[in-house]
Amino acid sequence: MNRIQNPVLDENVIYDILIIGGGATGLGIALDAASRGYKTLLVEQSDFAKGTSSRSTKLVHGGVRYLAQGNIGLVKHALEERGLLQRNAAHLVHREEFIIPCYSRFSVIKYLTGLTVYDWLAGKYSFGKSKYLSKKETLVLLPELKTKGLKGAIRYFDGKFDDARLAINIAQTAIEQGATLLTYTKVIGLQKNGDAVNGIITEDVITGNKNTYYGKVIINATGVFVDDILKMNSPDAKNMVRPSQGVHVVLDKKFMNSESALMIPKTSDGRVLFAVPWHEHILVGTTDTPLNEHSLEPKALKEEVDFILNTASDYFNLKPTEGDILSVFSGLRPLAAPKQAGTNSTKEISRDHKLIVSARGLITITGGKWTTYRRMAEETVDLAINEAKLQAKPCLTRELKIHGCTDFKDGSYLDIYGSDRMNIEALIAEDPELNAKLHPRFPYVKAEVVWAITNEMAETVEDILSRRLRVLFIDAQAAIEMSRTVAAILAKALHANTDWEDNQVEIFNKLASGYIYRADNKIERMALAK
Ligand SMILES: Cc1cc2nc3c(=O)[nH]c(=O)nc-3n(C[C@H](O)[C@H](O)[C@H](O)COP(=O)(O)OP(=O)(O)OC[C@H]3O[C@@H](n4cnc5c(N)ncnc54)[C@H](O)[C@@H]3O)c2cc1C
């Protein structure tokens, strides 16, 4: 599956459903629409999950925090989706044990009560029962935890996943169901018939070619970019989204050498913070910083990184410092903008999604969570059927397995490929040179790069090192050190010359330097919301 092998594009066809945006939301909609039998086209300006969908906390969860805010309906639906996703993407979604350390008897009672309700809301989709752990039991699970004043902990279960890999697997499933998906294809204008939107004007960001595609209904699933599309339809459309930045830092496992995740239920700014084992490292985050701007590469603010390190230091025996950060990355929540202007606290803005018909033929969907992407897609396609007067067909995604789904796991890091793992092993059997490692600190081998190019629509060094292998997000320096080898494999596969290869390395290294944290980094930071 690459750009060329993707189902043939037909400019003369009127697509039933045309989707802008290849993040969790757009990909979920493409999968839902194609599996119902609608002629579906999705365009993404960059790579799949380049935006927010590769920058999450990696939780498939109901949202303990939303429960505390009394958002029972949201939590219940998300817990059901968590269960469905674990069943349909069994190779990618795993049950994770979360530990909430308690430093007072009151917090033991409070969190145990809350999490018992959480378990109860999950019903038949429960991941396991929450319980109180003594101080001794807690320290067996999290030996690096600060012990002073520790009264014990509450253990609960939620899901953990690799967000970008799930996006790739959903894209593959959508294509298998008949959808056409184009990456590096940016919508630069909308096509209209009177006041109804009936098409998109696109630019191939690699070749510069422009095209027009027509659809019976157009779905704007562009995350924090939804307002840009809405303004293409009506320049004075009101903003639907307010971006809120969330930062994560990745640390060596020595700070928390555990299979369990740590959940800090109340930080100094009243939020929660997670430390989650992820690809043999520890992912710590996140923040919630309202911004007035959006970008595909938002940058962490010093205050956000300080906040994460200081909070983690309050709980870890070994205190992480700036120099310990292996990678820092930021994502923008496409939160629905509040009705009354002037609130600056984004944690109060709804995490639920917003779905509207913004003009005749144009549906916009924004907000929500990765966990609920399937449900959001179902609702969106139901609305699209109505809007475009398509022949109604039932949603099939509750039962539909995602590409790669298998229960077989033997603990190898290749388990993440699910049923594709054997294809990678077959590549190695055919050419043992492909078993060469890309970097001494990582298990990844050349065969995975070849696989990503030929079967996962990877086109650049960044696609491979950021979203097929997650090295850029785990250890940015190691990613820089791998970039030359990856560029050489890509150049060979794409019959590109050495200038192209050098250029790929240069572009990637410039990008990757933004993931290496330096407090004095002079990279221009995003403007904070007033
Ligand atoms: C810090 C953080 C942590 C989170 N953690 C979790 C978590 O642990 N669990 C969870 O369930 N949810 C989590 N979320 C929420 C979840 O990540 C998002 O809700 C989800 O990824 C949003 O997906 P999306 O497709 O709407 O947006 P995006 O992923 O941003 O996708 C939009 C896409 O549209 C494309 N696009 C934009 N303009 C155009 C154009 N003109 N033409 C073509 N394409 C275009 C962009 O390139 C982008 O790829 C988190 C969010 C953040 C920010």
Image (cartoon, rainbow, N blue to C red):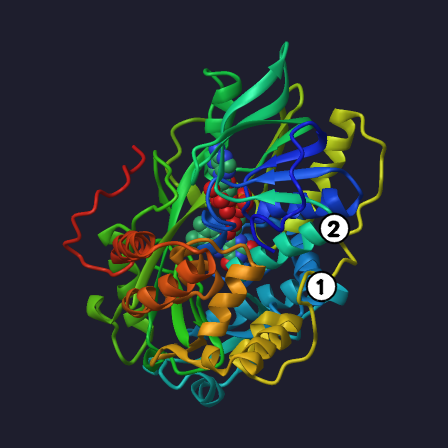
SS class, disc 2: loop
Where does residue 516 sit, x and y in percent of width and height? Answer: 25, 61
Residue name at image x 46 percent, y 16 percent: 235
- Which residue is denoted by mark 1 in the rendering? 88
| 395 sits to left or right of 239 | right
Q: Amino acid at mark 1?
A: Asn
* Nearest to the observer: residue 389 or residue 422: 422
Q: Are marks 1 and 2 in contact (CB under 8 Å)?
A: no
Q: Dot 1, crowdedness within 10 Å: few (<14), some or many (≥20)?
A: many
Where does residue 108 sit, x and y in percent of width and height? Answer: 50, 73
Where does residue 446 sit, x and y in percent of width and height? Answer: 45, 73
For residue 177, the mark is 2
Q: Amino acid at mark 2?
A: Gln
CA separation, marks 1 and 2?
A: 15 Å
* Nearest to the observer: residue 431 or residue 342: 431
Where does residue 326 sit, x and y in percent of width and height? Answer: 29, 68
Displayed quadrant of residue 86:
bottom right
Q: On the rendered image, what quadrant is the C terminus found in?
A: top left
Residue name at image x 59 percent, y 70 percent: 417
For residue 111, the mark is none
Mark 1 Cβ and ligand 1 under 8 Å apart: no
336 to 257, vertically: above or below = above
64 to 349, vertically: above or below = below
Closest to the camera, between mark 1 and mark 2, is: 2
* Nearest to the observer: residue 523 or residue 332: 523
SS class, disc 1: helix
498 to 309, vertically: above or below = above
Q: On the rendered image, what quadrant is the N terminus found in?
A: bottom right
* Nearest to the observer: residue 63 or residue 270: 63
Would you say residue 121 is visible in this rendering? Answer: no
| 226 sits to left or right of 217 | left
